[in-house]
Image (cartoon, rainbow, N blue to C red):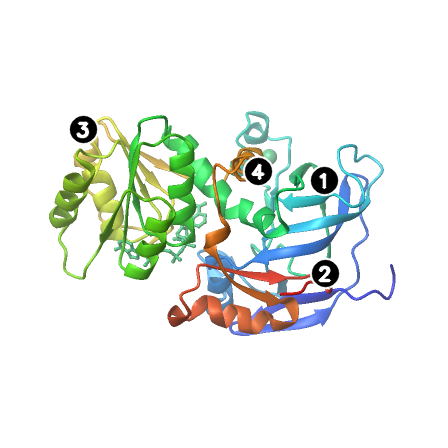
Amino acid sequence: MAGKDNLTAVLYGINDIRLEQRPIPTIKDDDVLLEMGAVGICGSDVHYLTKGRIGNFIVEKPMIIGHEASGTVVSVGKNVKHLQKGDRVAIEPGYSCRKCNYCKEGRYNLCPDMIFCATPPVDGNLMRYYAHPADFCFKLPDNVTLEEGAMLEPLSVGVHGCKRANIKVGSRVLVLGAGPIGLVTLLSAKAFGASKVIITDISSKRLELAKQLGADHTILVNKGDSDEDLIKKIVDSLGCEPDVSMDCSGAEQSVRVAIKATRSGGVALLIGMGAAEMTLPLCNALVREVDIRGVFRYVNCYPTALELIATGKVNVRPLVTHHYKIEETEKAFQTAMTPEMNAIKVMIHANANWKA
Ligand code: NAD
Ligand code: ZN
């Protein structure tokens, strides 16, 4: 395919994203070559664009951006059995060594040798053609769109959160933060059987969408609200203390409230990535045996997330608020980072034939 257009979005540094031609990748025996479909913009992509780093991950050389993605198989390596040309797939963006103890015990998200798209120095996949290991590509049934395929990435975070927190039929759940991750966590919790989900945010717009997506109660957090004010509102609306609280904001107060509001013996789950260090009521958790658990991305969650979408148990379509062509990447990022645009998920379409 020499000479073919492979327009690619490359992050050169802070507020410096450029479109350029890259060679179409050659595939190894276990890979597939994909014509890219939809690529969602994630908070982390925006963070790398505006700050150049997240913690110790620093953009030190030009990096292709994008990791919430789907595509169509163009060719397959000789070892690939489960996919063929023309299959549409969701791309799980991180692949692990498959050899270490974490990988062997089924917690490959903890693999120290994880290769994860658009986490420096690893390139992402906002480009027309991209190669990926076939075992981290999931074939989409006909009733699932390429956009929904891209949405499997954030949805998998919500699914992993529900598995980690052991959400089950009848669970009463508190979600803190109604951004894309809080919303997919809400949708997942409902699909896992939660009988009631209450969600908080500082933005009433986001809470409106949460309500449309099935939140039983919403709580607007105002500046100056004390932890106790919030906990009282939560318990009054829910009728009880939550069995599980899932922080999806990273805000210190939310994490505190997640711990304090949870019933004794329940689970406080940390999904939001906030400050590296926080002041938290750990004794409160200790004396009431509230388990504080972390969530890092997802592991073996794409198949579950795909089933939820394919069977209609979860509808992620209302989360997709904006669409752009890859040629409009800069504008797409502007939309994602301008609060007045009220974006939840901005989709970039990499396929040259895509039409709005
Ligand atoms: P986002 O910034 O769009 O959403 C955060 C939401 O929290 C916003 O709607 C914001 O208004 C709300 N918020 C802020 N302060 C609050 C407060 N005091 N109380 C209640 N709500 C408050 O980001 P997102 O894309 O939805 O991601 C959410 C968090 O999850 C981020 O910290 C992100 O880094 C993290 N994340 C973690 C993982 C993981 O593997 N653990 C994966 C993806 C994202
Ligand atoms: Zn490994």
Q: Which residue is drawn at 69% across and 51% down?
A: 71
Give the Cα separation between the discs numbered 4 and 3. Answer: 40 Å
Where ligand 2 lies, by image quadrant?
top right
Give the Cα separation between the discs numbered 2 and 4. Answer: 26 Å
Q: Mark number for residue 310?
A: 4
Q: Which residue is drawn at 31% across and 54% down?
A: 207
Q: How crowded is mark 3: few (under 14 residues within 10 Å), some or many (20 or more)?
A: some
**Circle nearer the N terminus (1, 3):** 1
Circle nearer the viewer, 4 or 3: 4
**Circle nearer the N terminus (3, 2):** 2
The kind of residue on which mark 4 rests is Ala
Up-down: is 115 above or below 193? below
Q: Mark number for residue 128?
A: 2
Residue under label 3, please give it. Answer: 288
**Circle nearer the N terminus (2, 4):** 2
The local secondary structure at tag 4 comes to helix
Q: Residue at x 35, y 26 (%)?
A: 169
Residue under label 1, please give it. Answer: 134
Q: How crowded is mark 4: few (under 14 residues within 10 Å), some or many (20 or more)?
A: some
Q: In the image, 275: left or right of 110?
A: left
